[in-house]
Amino acid sequence: MAPPSDQEVAAARAAFPTGLLQPEGGYRFSLDPLLLAVFARPKKNARMADLGTGCGVAALAALLAHPAASTALGLDVAPAMARAATSNAASLGISDRFAALNLDIRCVRDARPDLEPESFGLVLANPPYRRLGTGQPCPGEERNRARFETGAGLEDFLAAAAWLLANRGALAIVFPAARLPELLCGCVAARLSPKRLRMVHSRLEEPARLVLLEAVKNAGAELAVEPPLVLYEGYGENTRMTEAALAYCPFLARNP
């Protein structure tokens, strides 16, 4: 297949994340990986890994939002998702900065020479949110695996991140606010020190729904809690994204 023209790349970037290829029957991304991508703070020339990359949305958004980052490697257990992520990177004109690897994150230690320990400066993670037996199963194996801990769970994601990250490298993760105690304890056990936290609320008067957390490998114990992010205002037909949310993550204005 011929590479996209400059005009096609410009149009794809202007529309992002609208237009991303998502395999039929597979998991459909929401706003969570977009928030994760802008929350992350890759250092200059940082090499990123995206655990459970799906169609690549978080890693691709991070590369677009943070030009200083060098490359990203997306890992996904589903071959169709890895292929879709590769195709999406090509349509955005960043195939030279992104690659996808079909791999169960529980097997990162066995993936040499493709993966070496402590070889990444930043890891992105959007793990399955629900434990088995805590909600209605999704139709389709891939959607079910993305939502429920049928395979890799939080502990597996944290272990993979700790193995991949260089000393003082950072994990950026999005997770349900209700499971924050479990997330914090898991990070500490994996030698990933929680350093920066932001709560995400659907509306100002509602409890936090999500948490964005940065944890640094082998760092100190101080934690900075950032101002809360409120996504919506108004109700019913008057519901709209807040100006603060759109300013924080411009991708939300085009999120399908």
Image (cartoon, rainbow, N blue to C red):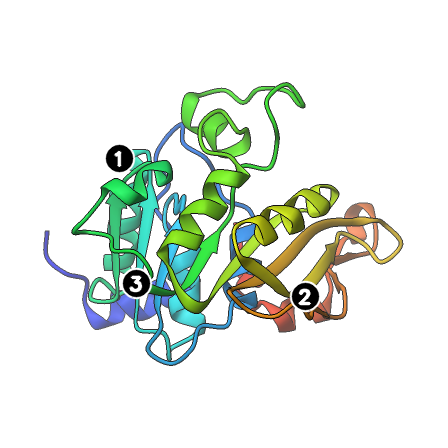
Q: Residue at x 58, y 52 (%)?
A: 187
Q: Percent x, y for residue 75?
A: 33, 46
> Looking at the picture, which amino acid does disc 2 mark?
Ala
Q: Percent x, y for residue 18?
A: 44, 54
Q: Percent x, y for residue 233?
A: 80, 58
Between the residue at mark 3 and the residue at mark 1, the CA separation in whole angstroms equals 24 Å
Q: Which mark is residue 119?
A: 3
Question: Who is closer to the viewer here, 190 or 5?
Answer: 190
State if disc 3 and disc 2 touch (CB < 8 Å): no
Between the residue at mark 2 and the residue at mark 3, the CA separation in whole angstroms equals 33 Å
> Looking at the picture, which amino acid does disc 1 mark?
Pro
Q: Residue at x 40, y 27 (%)?
A: 25
Question: Who is closer to the viewer here, 6 or 134?
Answer: 134
Q: Which mark is residue 79?
A: 1
> Looking at the picture, which amino acid does disc 3 mark?
Ser
Mark 3: secondary structure: loop
Residue 77, compared with residue 31, is above or below; it is above
Question: Who is closer to the viewer here, 165 or 42?
Answer: 165
Mark 1: secondary structure: helix
Which numbered disc flags the more N-terminal residue, 3 or 1? 1
